[in-house]
Image (spheres, coloured by chain):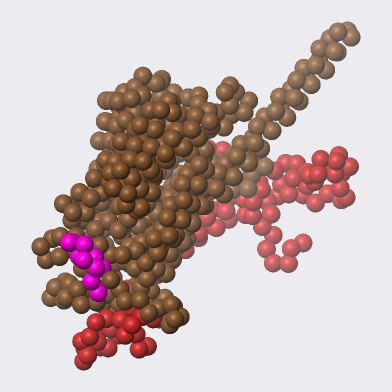
Amino acid sequence: MIGSLLAQVNTLKEAGSAAAQTQDSAILSEQFYFFTVVIMWLIHAGFMSYETGVARRKNALATAMKNILTIAVVTPTFYYFGWWIYNCNQPGLPVGPNSSDFTGAACQGGIPWSDTFGPNLTNNINLVFFLAFLLFSWTTASIMSGAIIERARLTAYLVLACILGSVVWILDAAWGWSAGGWLTLRFGFHDSIASGVVHGVAGAFTLGVLFNLGPRIGKYTREGLARQFRPHNLHMTLLGLMLIFTGFYGFYAACLVIASTAFPGWANIYLSPTTLGSIAMIITMGFAGGFTGGYFASRGDPFWTVSGGLAGVISVSAGADVYAPTLGYLIAMASAAMTVYIGNWIEKRMRVDDAVGAVAVHGAAGFLGMLWVGVFAAGYPTGVNNVDSSIGGQLMGMATFLPLGFLTGWVCSWVMKKLNILRVPPEVELMGLDVAEYEPNLYLPEVGVVTEQLVEPDGTPVEAAIVLRNARDEVVV
Amino acid sequence: MPLLIDSAPDCVVHKEGANADDLADFVLQQNYEDCAGFGTFMPGSTYGDDGSGAETLYMIVTWLGIVVMVAVLVAWVLYENRRLIQAAMGYTRAEAPAGGPPPQPGGVGDTR
């Protein structure tokens, strides 16, 4: 009798202890994702600073405001349909074979009127996990924002940001960045910290937009040679990149699943075990290799050196959960060097005016990152079907993401171009977006006596006004 | 009773006085004992798949947000379009007689 009672007491104690442990684990997870979100805000402070510094002074405020207003539009769109896309579209598109089951419980957390998608005493996780993904969405949209500065309309950018940030990237994330996505289940596609899912797709989308947007007035000579517009504040640009780098640690951490009651406590997005230390090590080695590769490939150019760090990290992100540190270092160095050449090729050969090199740094490095997993990290079970990562699976992912990003960007911007809501009028572009969009007299006279210059293809700095006016007349005529 | 709108779900009750056990845990739980989704206009419970148990009022509030979001985006596009066209016309008129280089805001040649 007494023995039976003691056994019951012990069972109750164990149950109570397990319940408390589960609650502790839930609260730990909630705090973890919350603080990754806080850290990831730095990415957006960084993008703003980075792009504003690159812009000519007459476009500085418009450039900064565009970054801030990303938050105003991507947040509600991602809340109302972005999270639903991720939760409900992992098996595939809504129609056709293996179409998604929209009545399934998996959709539950993503529907805006779901009980777990608002204040709920029985679910600590869904909202903070949503917020982490929302910050990824802002990042994805912001990747495009820098490339199109100084001539795209604010609202054109905002609409495109909604499409990229709340539809395109999250659809590819459903397919290839979840344990149940069809790319993962069938092909073992492995992109653990989103080389391609975020950066590659955003770069492809941006390239599609740039084809329709066209270069800034005066960017190319009549012969098609590229002029350089001088950044109005290179220090601000470098500071912005440093902020982005800091925020990337939050981004990397948020890509992991924390499971404190299970060994080893962490899993990648495909629910395979890894550690926070593993990915933190790779991001740091990625920066080291990236800066080095960027420096030597660009012969010490500050912009490409620092951008090389970003390209390096992006290129090792896909395999950051499993790469050895040395491998991460070498891959990042080689990829950053390749990115410099790709960036110059895009500008000078393709004659695509990408103001911050986003297509090369994010797009090319992102796709290289996916490829490197197939080359250097094949054989790792990925997803709940335990399909091994392989070069074939990675190529399948790349072949899916490239058209998804590029064609969507191209088609959407083409429609906006036809509606004449893509680009500012040439007169406004010449005068500067700040004056038309915001305040006529932004700067005090004593700090405003700098004549705008640009650099001709042969390296000669010249006063910009006459060159731009002539270029504008060619556009208008 | 609330003066205008009582948006709290029915699961939120108003018990008299604080429970000593609650105070010991620093969370006054007794008023929310039966709650899951307890936000404004929410049903207060666990709804089931696809939010099928969400009440009419909560759906109306959610869809109102969606409609406002779309309307704001459209209005924003139209507003900026009008503003840019006005600015472009202003510049064209202003620069026609002189034909000099365009001034930077606040820079050399800016006579505004």
Q: Nearer the viewer, residue A337 or A398?
A: A337
* Residue drawn at 44 percent across, 60 percent down: A236
Q: Is residue B69 above or below residue A251?
A: below
Q: Nearer the viewer, residue A155 or B4?
A: A155
Q: Position of residue B106 (x, y in %)?
A: 39, 81
* Residue drawn at 50 percent across, 35 percent down: A280
Q: Position of residue A352 (x, y in %)?
A: 21, 55
Q: Nearer the viewer, residue A455 or A144?
A: A455
Hue used for the chain lettered B: red
Hue used for the chain lettered A: brown
Q: Is residue A455 magenta?
A: yes
Quadrant assignment, res A56? bottom left
Q: Is residue A377 visible?
A: yes
Q: Is residue A85 above or below residue A50?
A: above
* Residue drawn at 52 percent across, 55 percent down: B62
Question: Which residue in the rendered view is the most extreme toward the left?
Answer: A223
Figure quadrant of the N terminus of chain B? bottom right
Is A119 left or right of A314, judged from the image as shown? Answer: right
Q: Position of residue A192 (x, y in %)?
A: 42, 33
Q: Position of residue B74 (x, y in %)?
A: 38, 66
Q: Is residue A91 above or below residue A154?
A: above
Q: Is residue A80 visible?
A: no
Q: Is residue A162 above or below residue A376?
A: below
Span highlighted in magenta in the image = A454-464
Q: Is residue A462 magenta?
A: yes
* Residue drawn at 50 percent across, 42 percent down: A249
Figure quadrant of the C terminus of chain B? bottom left
